[in-house]
Structure formats: structure tokens, C-alpha cells
Amino acid sequence: MPEPLAESQQHDSLGRQLVRSRFRSFYARSQPYPAELVRREFGFGFTKKIDYRHKSFSSRNDFTDYLLLEIPFFVSYSTALYEKPSATPMNRKGYLGADLVFDLDTSYEKDGEHEHNPILCPHCLERVKEDCIRLAEDFLLNDFGVSENELTINYSGSKGYHLHVQNQAVRQLSAEARKQLLSYITATELDLTRFLRKEQFGQRKDDYVIRGPSWQARGWAKKLFTTAHSFIEKAEAKEFKEEHISSQRAKKITENRAIILNKMNEGNWDALRGMDSVWEKLLRKAVVLQSLEVDKAVTYDLHRLIRLEDSLHGDTGFVAKKIPLNQLHDFKPHEHALAFDEKQTHWIKSNVTGTLEIQGQKIELTEGKLIEVPENAAIYLLCKQKAELK
């Protein structure tokens, strides 16, 4: 990982001056701030993401004045509320509770479905966005019963997304309770034997039926049901082979699809005998497909600082943009999280060879070559240390 622009580009005074100037103009017109600002602790980054913390502000105007005077490259604030946010050590702050926050930044660089673009990869951004949608819709809204008006989602400004839940009940959750929520989301302690059980109806060893989740199930039972049901409904020879299901077994399943699916809807997973190993494989597959990777420490650390939504990210120059859930499906960071003038251009010398897809266009870069690029592209490349301003 390269160091942030503020430390690494001190030799590039022109580039540094441009970025600082544009960051300042952004904060002059945008003025982001969090809910309940006076109860929050703030941290700021000039040479890294957080150089110092334990800063507080008495008003929104004081906060904006600080941004315009100091022009930090990174702005973070506490997920917790305090009586005295700037006090040290931590036990003197007067902890009042903390928002429930999730950070998704899973790397998809090695995802075999695409050729990764190390300059800026739209595929990786799309995959993490899909995780964000699943976390919001499948877990927070459906399973945990969070109200949509209590949920705030913002793009991190770089690789991932942050989800904030703000209500009085969740603010009082302990670190241990938050770890239990994480365990549920990541399926780290999920016991699959709880979801498929044998019900004996006679004296012989084989006198049993297999009971499992039905279409009316909820939570993880519903997720397991949905994945297994969908597989049985749609799988062809290739998919059976990928799951190491024999061709003979696959033939029996395809010949009896309708019966198996109808029985599954009722919670009877025993329409076709000898399916025990098939169900085990499909449930394990469901866990992989339905669980999520999150940065656990962000969620259970009650004194965590996290990037301020609608602030700028010093490694990209992108906005950590707040996004309504109903607009998240169409959101593209490299088009919709841009902060600067698309008509203004700058000459830069590229330090890399490749393609930068930004602002709806593809810019071809060659190492050592001068090129004129839109300002959003110039700021991004300068922040990423992939170019020098000329």
C-alpha cells in the first residue's frame, strides 16, 4: 500500500498545492458534519489516516472553520457519543453509547471472474457494493429488524462501504453483543446440524425422514433453504459436477425436481432418499454464498473512529458519499463520488501504464508520458502517487 499523498508527495509541491487547494474549495462549498457533532470525538490525518485524535468542536461553524484552515486529507469521527469528547484518557470522556457501524472492504483482486485493474477496478468496486446491499437488505433490515430510516450508508471514498445504525437501543449494545451480531453475519459459529434433522417414525434404522427449513423459514434457515432450493431447481450437469455430485445422483435429482422442490417447500427434505451428502454440500455452499466478510474491529470497538460521510478520502480524492439504499444499486464510485470540476483539465506525467476508467471515460496511461486529463482524474492519480503534476 502506498503512503498517503500528504507524506509521499512533499517533493511534488505543485501536485500537493493543487490537491490542498481543491480540498479546501470542496469543504468551503460542501461542509460535511455528523449527527450530534458536539458529542463526537474527531481525528484528522495529514501524513496518514489518523495523525491525532481527541479533538472536539462546539458547533458546526467551528468544525467547518477547522477544515478550511487546516485542510486535512482524512477526517474521522467517533462512532461513540461522549460527555467530554476531547478528554483523555478514554475513561474520562464519559461514554454515552455508540452507533452500530459496519465496514465492508473485502478485496476481490484475486477474483477469477475478471482481470484486475490495479489503477482503479470497477469490478472490485461493484462486488463490494453487492456485499453492502446484502448486508443492508438481508441482514440489517430483514433479520435484525432495523428500520430503513435508522440506517445510513456511505461509500468509504476508497474500496468499500460503511453502514451506520443509529438508534438508542443499538447504542447501548456492549462490545460482546456486537461480536454476536458479527458471528451471525459471518456465520463463524453456525451449526448446520441444527437445520437438518432426522425424525424417526419406526423401529428400523432407516425409518426416518429428513426435516429442514421450509419456504416460510426466517434468518439463516431461510438463507440455507433459498440456496439449496435454487440449486435443485436450476442446476445442470456442470453445476452438479462443480459440487462433486455424481452423475447418477444428478440424474435422479433432475428426474424428480418437481417432487423434491414441492416437498422442500413444506420442510420435507426427504423426497429422494440418499440425499444426506448432497444436502451437506449445498448447505456448506449456502454459507459461503450468504455470509459476509466485515472488518470486525470496526463494529465491536466502542471507541472506534471512522471516516466522516461526505468528506474527502486523501488516498483517492473521492467523496465518502452518503447514498440512500434505493439508489445504491445504480451507484458507481468512479462516476458518482467525484468531487471536482469535470471541465477543468491538467497536464500530468504518469508513473504507470494502464487504463483509468473514471468519469465515464477510459484514459490510457503510459509510464513517463505527459497527458492532459480531467481534474477528477488528475486528483485521483496524484493522491494515488500514480502521476506528477506538470
Image: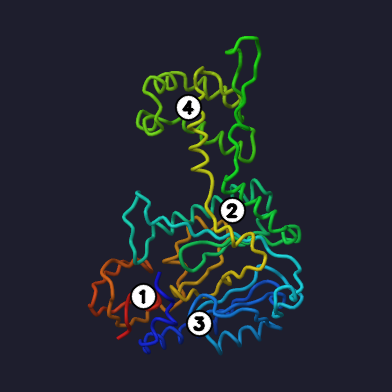
Is 365 above or below relative to 225?
A: below
Q: Position of residue 120 (x, y in %)?
A: 37, 65
Give the mark nearer the N terminus: 2 vs 1: 2
* CA–CA distance in space, label 3 to label 2: 32 Å
Residue type at tag 1: Leu
Give the mark nearer the N terminus: 1 vs 3: 3
* CA–CA distance in space, label 2 to label 1: 32 Å
Check disc 3 and report the residue beneath it. Answer: 46
Q: Position of residue 277 (x, y in %)?
A: 49, 26
Residue at image coords 42%, 22% = 254
Give the quadrant of residue 208: top right
Q: In which quarter of the image is the N terminus?
A: bottom left
SS state under label 2:
helix
Q: Position of residue 347 (x, y in %)?
A: 29, 82
Q: Nearer the viewer, residue 85 or 158?
A: 85
Give the mark nearer the N terminus: 2 vs 4: 2
Check disc 1 and report the residue beneath it. Answer: 381
Residue type at tag 4: Val
Residue type at tag 2: Ala
Label drawn at residue 96: none
SS state under label 4:
helix
Give the mark nearer the N terminus: 4 vs 1: 4
Check disc 2 and report the residue beneath it. Answer: 136
Label drawn at residue 278: 4
Give the mark nearer the N terminus: 3 vs 4: 3
* CA–CA distance in space, label 3 to label 4: 55 Å
